[in-house]
Image: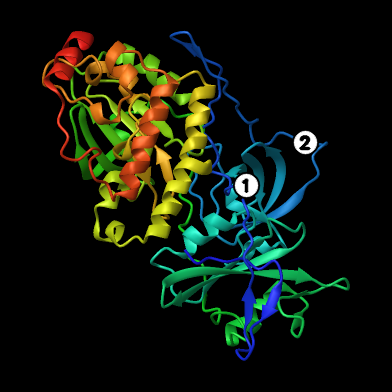
């Protein structure tokens, strides 16, 4: 990708530019939206859930030190326990209750709960559009490489190699294409910051202002803060089984053997993906038991299950991923333009610490996916990949107990699973390798031109009866 990082700054001869030096780093992704919270402890079909309900507004908290925050985004209250706020509004935090904080508006005097990642402490760098505190190097590159960010787009983040230091990431355009370059921002003992020792600044704001006027040795003049997608309202605290009328289906995304997938809105406020199952696919009771089990599987690399409609036709409401499935994305004009380094980076999301991390979590939970392929990996607006349709193959077994003529992902399935009809996490590992082949070939069908031997077809029919 040609991406470099600056552990120290080296001046290039005759160019007057400060060139970053390569240094590989790793880090954690920014925290996800506040998770779904319910206000009771329930047990259904032998599956136990832990529901943590925050205390009601108005409760006093003498042991909690009060502090003040400013809203980073608008938040529309989802129920009478929430506090509606506008971007820039100042609030007093009365109680930090996990992901939902009890706050008091300094404008209206009202109390209620707000999502903790929608606010930041006053007089912190979070109010700056260019500051991305906890984003890691690789995710910074992915966000800056988004088409909406042009040359000179930038962000400042905490350094992953030097505690207390910062890094400046800038989008550059070279003859080899778009690259992201990283510069170490060093601190002065007496206070202040610098990239080049010849220019020092009392604050990061002053540093940004200087390099926004002229590049002064950087690869580009800083033109605009990295544009990131605004957080949408988090899911309501206690909503799992929801009425069909609360959903609005807007655009059909696709259809398959078991139903259709739509983009829509919940309560005209939260954009979601809605999977509709054909009537008679399975009983509502069996679905609800499995769906509640799926609800307990929560990981940043699994597409999140929000809610269900249990009366037929059954609806499954999940996190919306704007780019759709990985298989379709790789076949688009944008996907076809991805360079080999970008494909390798996408594979790295799968094999280093992204999808593999999600698969490790699935194994830890004593579960298996059984249908891991590019068609079941979903892609976000910033090209973040997540495992989708987890549990669907287990809920709807027709694809694996197939009658004659039913679809069966034979080219993704491990030989022992085909021969014995037994699926384990090892079979998922096999499918994982085929998935990597799909990525590097822009979504081509594995083993092109190969057809099943008649003997294999007879074996499948015998095993799957």
Q: Position of residue 363 (x, y in %)?
A: 50, 23
Give the residue drawn at x 38%, y 58%: 340
Mark 1 = which residue?
110
The answer to whether 315 is drawn above or below residue 341 in the figure is above
Does any portion of residue 86 appear in the rendered image? no
Q: CA distance from mark 2 to mark 1?
A: 16 Å
Pointer 2 local density, CA inside 10 Å: few below 14, some 14–19, many at least 20? few
Model colouring = rainbow
- Tell me: residue 316, above or below residue 464: below
Residue 39, image quadrant: top right
For the point 51% across and 61% down, the residue is 141
Using residue 283 as the reference point, say whether residue 151 is left or right of it.
right
Which residue is at the far bottom?
A: 14
Local packing at callout 1 (Cα closer than 10 Å; few below 14, some 14-19, many 20+) is some
Q: Residue at x 60, y 27 (%)?
A: 53
- Helix, strand or loop under label 2: loop
Looking at the image, tell me whether mark 2 or mark 1 is earlier in sequence order. 2
The residue pinned by badge 2 equals 61
Q: Tag 1, which secondary structure?
A: loop
Picture disc at residue 399: none
Q: Is residue 12 left or right of residue 333?
A: right
Q: Is residue 392 left or right of residue 7?
A: left
Q: Nearer the viewer, residue 241 or 429?
A: 429
Q: Compared with residue 404, is residue 29 higher up or lower down, i.e. above or below?
A: below
Seen at 53% across and 35% down, the residue is 35
Q: Is residue 152 left or right of residue 422?
A: right
The quadrant where residue 5 appears: bottom right
């Amino acid at each position: 990708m040609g991406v470099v990082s600056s552990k120290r700054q080296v001046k290039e001869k005759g160019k007057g530019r400060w060139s970053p030096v390569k240094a590989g780093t790793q880090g954690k992704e920014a925290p996800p939206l506040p998770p779904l919270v319910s206000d009771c402890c329930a047990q259904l079909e032998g599956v136990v859930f832990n529901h943590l309900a925050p205390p009601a507004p108005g409760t006093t908290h003498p042991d909690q030190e009060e502090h003040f925050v400013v809203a980073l985004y608008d938040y529309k209250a989802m129920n009478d326990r929430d506090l509606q706020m506008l971007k820039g509004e100042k609030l007093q935090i009365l109680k930090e209750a996990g992901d939902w904080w009890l706050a008091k508006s300094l404008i209206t005097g009202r109390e209620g709960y707000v999502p903790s990642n929608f606010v930041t402490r006053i007089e912190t760098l979070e109010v700056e559009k260019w500051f991305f505190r906890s984003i890691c190097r690789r995710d910074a590159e992915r966000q800056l490489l988004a088409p909406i960010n042009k040359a000179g787009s930038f962000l400042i983040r905490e350094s992953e190699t030097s505690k207390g230091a910062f890094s400046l990431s800038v989008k550059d355009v070279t003859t080899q294409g778009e690259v992201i370059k990283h510069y170490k921002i060093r601190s002065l003992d007496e206070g202040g910051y610098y990239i080049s020792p010849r220019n020092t600044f009392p604050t990061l704001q002053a540093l940004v202002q200087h390099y926004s006027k002229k590049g002064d040795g950087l690869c580009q003049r800083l033109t605009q803060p990295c544009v990131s997608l605004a957080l949408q309202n988090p899911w309501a605290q206690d909503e799992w089984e929801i009425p069909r009328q609360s959903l609005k289906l807007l655009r059909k995304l696709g259809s398959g053997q078991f139903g259709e997938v739509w983009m829509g809105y919940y309560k005209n406020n939260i954009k979601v993906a809605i999977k509709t199952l054909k009537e008679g696919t399975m009983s509502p009771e069996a679905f609800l038991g499995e769906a509640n089990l799926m609800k307990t599987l929560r990981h940043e690399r699994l597409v999140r299950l929000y809610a269900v409609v249990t009366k037929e036709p059954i609806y499954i409401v999940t996190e919306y991923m704007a780019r759709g499935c990985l298989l379709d994305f790789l076949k688009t004009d944008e996907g076809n333009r991805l360079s080999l380094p970008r494909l390798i980076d996408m594979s790295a999301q799968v094999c280093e610490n992204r999808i593999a991390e999600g698969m490790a979590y699935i194994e830890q939970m004593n579960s298996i996916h059984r249908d891991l392929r590019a068609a079941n990996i979903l892609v976000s607006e910033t090209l973040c990949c997540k495992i989708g349709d987890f549990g669907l193959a287990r809920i709807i077994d027709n694809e694996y107990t197939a009658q004659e003529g039913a679809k069966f992902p034979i080219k993704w399935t491990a030989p022992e699973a085909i021969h014995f009809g037994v699926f384990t996490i090892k079979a998922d590992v096999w499918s994982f390798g085929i998935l990597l082949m799909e990525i590097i070939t822009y979504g081509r069908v594995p083993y092109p031109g190969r057809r099943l031997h008649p003997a294999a077809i007879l074996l499948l029919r015998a095993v799957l009866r």
